[in-house]
Image (cartoon, helix red, strand yellow):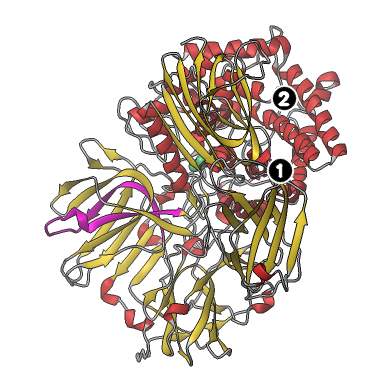
Amino acid sequence: MQNALFSLKCEGQDSPVGIDTGTPILAWKVIQKGYPGRQKNFRILLSDQKENLSSLKNMLWDYKADVEENHVIYHGQELSSRSVYYWKVILTTDSGKTIESHTASFETGFLSPDCWEAQWINLSKEPLPMHQPEVNAEGEPLPVKFEEITFGPVHQVRKEFSVKKPVTHARLYMTAHGVYLPLLDGERIGQYELTPGHTMYRNQLFYQIYDITGSLTPGSHTIGAYIADGWYRGRMGFDGSNCQQGNELALLLQLELEYEDGTSDKVCSDDSFQVTEGAYIYADMMTGEKYDARLEKKDFFLNGYKNSDFRYAKVMEETYDNLRAQTGNHILVSEVLLPKNWYRLSEEEVMFDFGTCIAGRVRIQVSEEAGQEIRIEHSEVEGPGHSFTKNIITPYREQIETYICKGEPYEIYEPMFNYHGFRYVKISGLTGEINPDNFSAYVLGTEMERTSAFSCSDERVNQLQRNILRSQLSNMISIPTDCPQREKAGWTGDVQIYAATACFNQDAKNFFLHWLEDVRYCQSEDGQIPIIVPFLPGHARAFEGIGSSAGWSEVIIILPWVLYQYYGDPKILADFYDSMEKWVEYVRYTSSTENPEGLQNVTGERAEHLKYIWNTGFHFGDWLTPSVSMNPETGDVDLMQSAIMTMDIVPTFFYAYSCILMEQISHVLNKEERAGYYAKLYQKIKDAFQYEYINDDGTIKSNLQGIQVLALHTGLVEGKAKEKTIQKLVELIHENHDSLDTGFLSTPYLMDVLTEAGYKDLAWKLLYNEQFPSWLYEVKMGATSIWESWQGILPNGQISHVSMAHYAFGCIGDWMYRNILGIRSLAPGYKRILFSPDLHCGLTHAEGSYDSIHGFISCAWEIRKKDIFMTLTVPFNTEAQLSIPDASMESLTLNGKAVSCKDTNSQGIFLDLPAGNYQLTFQRETE
Ligand code: BGC
């Protein structure tokens, strides 16, 4: 039971079941809003009996520390597998008060691979042949011809077993090579979707844990599952080839029962498991499913199945060392949407509009003749006059579910083994009356706590925030992806660009850490970090010779750094430090030994500088910079142009930025010698950049906004050159009709660079701009998510072949939260907070919050002429400052009383605020 004062988490979860570590992280926070004080010390009590926590007897851990930290790694007596533990925390506050939490629990699962008694079983009759699409003269994969693909069928597996006595405790541990859907006596077990998710399976394969105690009455039962190709052997990667992680589907299942009388039993996968195929002709993650309801074999999952149309599974040799328990971050259905509109396209074709761009699937209920074929096609955009259009490029253009009816009234079909990015679906084969309520969209997402709230007086900005969130939710599907519509791939650049916004909106710590494990695993011997993780053979083929890319590969440094800022845990930095160093060393070595054509014979001073310029190899550069990524002939997006234009200069910025971060990270980890090393390396890069890229008049040799932004962000320009670069950036924006012209890599820093250079008004102009390209242009065009490219839909209505749900340009969220809500972190984990909303931002009110690891932080403000009304919440164990430079402190009231402020500037309000809830009123100097 949770009381209203504390939140207690074990391994980032509330009372997790089945954790596989004997040293879990226990974390707590006081959740009562604005609870006063700080933690002076904490005491953790942990036992295997709940009562012991009151009697203080037989404690497995009774640990006390005089620190303010609100998490600790368990290091008490050894924990056992399959056991429940109870714990609580008692804090003493700085005023001497003692506060005690409720009791929380966690359950261990398999603490060692030896706990697995189940055997891996191979379910496939034969290995699926690998299919690689044809490529054109440029080496680009051609659209796949459906007829040419050999899809594997979905397997059905069953095992009948008997429950001998009343059960008090039953846990099912299960995973697969493929995507599985578990069933008990024909009924679905649990709510987890697309298990076991998408990882580099050789490195980490998650198993899921299900509590099925309530379903196991004494008698016969049948445990089973459907197993589809999924990410394992379905079509994946840029070229659309299949069998990327393996070519046979397999299952691992261990059901553990404890009986009332203290005895126990197990059901383990072995060669007595029966396998067959049924209605699923195929189910592919990218291409879609084909389901022939006439071939259904649902009774296969029931007791007493008599037919002999099955084969026995084959036991296989397989490691257990890569198995990891998944105790959170499952994929779940988060919403169900009904159509907002529907349009008849032809006699048997209907288009449904679900009103918003999502990732998920469609569920239909139909009553048609046996053999009638229903096709469901997905799209994120509609064509002129509410027509159906597909804007998907790459081999994944066809994303079609096909359902063949069995001829019963009210047949329900819901594809279970893939997902799509869509807002519109075309359904063909519907002959009867249409009742739109029979068609719904199931939104999928990874379960992660929502930690943000945001609203303001401009409805357009609110819609932008909703669009940011939508794209985030649609792309957090097992791993952070680029888009749900096309590649569904873990592009590393997109993640580093968006990570800060993501963490404000959701508690994404474990989600990102799991993915980072695969990033590290995919790092090559020479230190390169791939552009996509999981990095599959198909990616390697499609991007032959591209082992890494500036601004993408730095995810190995930037993401842990962002996670440290949000979650305050230096262990995150320590865990990935070696990989970070390896990456920077790769860049240093490459820069110092390679020069592009034309610069290979340079000698003397320039040659020395060139050693610190990273200008070889392929890079995506400031990807999708609007002015250079448009094809002038077709008006469509030419994906490669901005790469070609900027790949010589952009890498050096990221080399420099890596050094800046590595210096700071080394300080955090007390690696002072390494910090010094990176500081020196940065200086050399800076000198070299100035030598190579700065003209005599101080300007940079580039006329792109993004390049000015990156030079300013990385501090590579200073003095006169800095002035000139700022001037140039401002000029370029004005010349572009006060619109941005930045790509993936520079957009995250554009607004901060302008703000810091004293051009905050221009930054606000960019935010509120409705002209193409801009954030509110997309809103004006009816966007319900963030587009991959600013040119998603051109002002003339032309639809580009880009995805409409990429989160990268949603990185503006981070700036909005800091500047509109004014919530900033001054110390890792928001241990010190700065409230500094810009009251001249053009809005009349804003309110929002961030639920940090220490507790709830909020800021709401409203302007009525010169009067400001503000409400702030500072969580327990933190401290905050309020800084409103343009306000009069004489006018200030705090919780109804006049106060005297720390006046550092003779003007402005600068106030220290300990934990608490505050209501303030004051006046601005200017309106
Ligand atoms: C993806 C991006 C990715 C890019 C590489 C695209 O196809 O969708 O988001 O970062 O390729 O530049």
Query: Looking at the image, is 325 positioned above or below residue 41?
Result: below
Q: Which mark is residue 812?
A: none
Q: Secondary structure at mark 1?
A: loop
Q: Is residue 589 left or right of residue 381?
A: right
Q: Earlier in the sequence, mark 2 or mark 1?
A: 1
Identify the residue shown where x is 54% and y is 29%.
815
Disc 2 under 8 Å from ligand 1? The reply is no
Q: Which residue is mark 1?
A: 94
Residue situated in front as seen by the camera: 242 or 404:
404
Identify the residue shown where x is 56% and y is 45%.
491
Answer few, some or many: residues within 10 Å of disc 1's Cα (few below 14, many 20 plus, some between 14 and 19).
Answer: some
Q: Secondary structure at mark 2?
A: loop
Query: Looking at the image, is 894 positioned above or below residue 201?
Result: above
Identify the residue shown where x is 28% and y is 40%.
382
The CA span between labels 2 and 1 is: 66 Å
Q: Is residue 871 left or right of residue 416?
A: right
Residue 879 falls in which quadrant of the image? top right
Identify the residue shown where x is 76% and y is 46%.
577
Residue situated in front as seen by the camera: 378 or 869:
869
Amino acid, disc 2? Gly
Residue 402 falls in which quadrant of the image? bottom left
Region rendered in magenta? 418-445
The residue at the far right in this view is 673
In magenta segment, residue 711 = no
Q: Which residue is mark 2?
A: 598
Give the number of marks.
2
Amino acid, disc 1? Asp
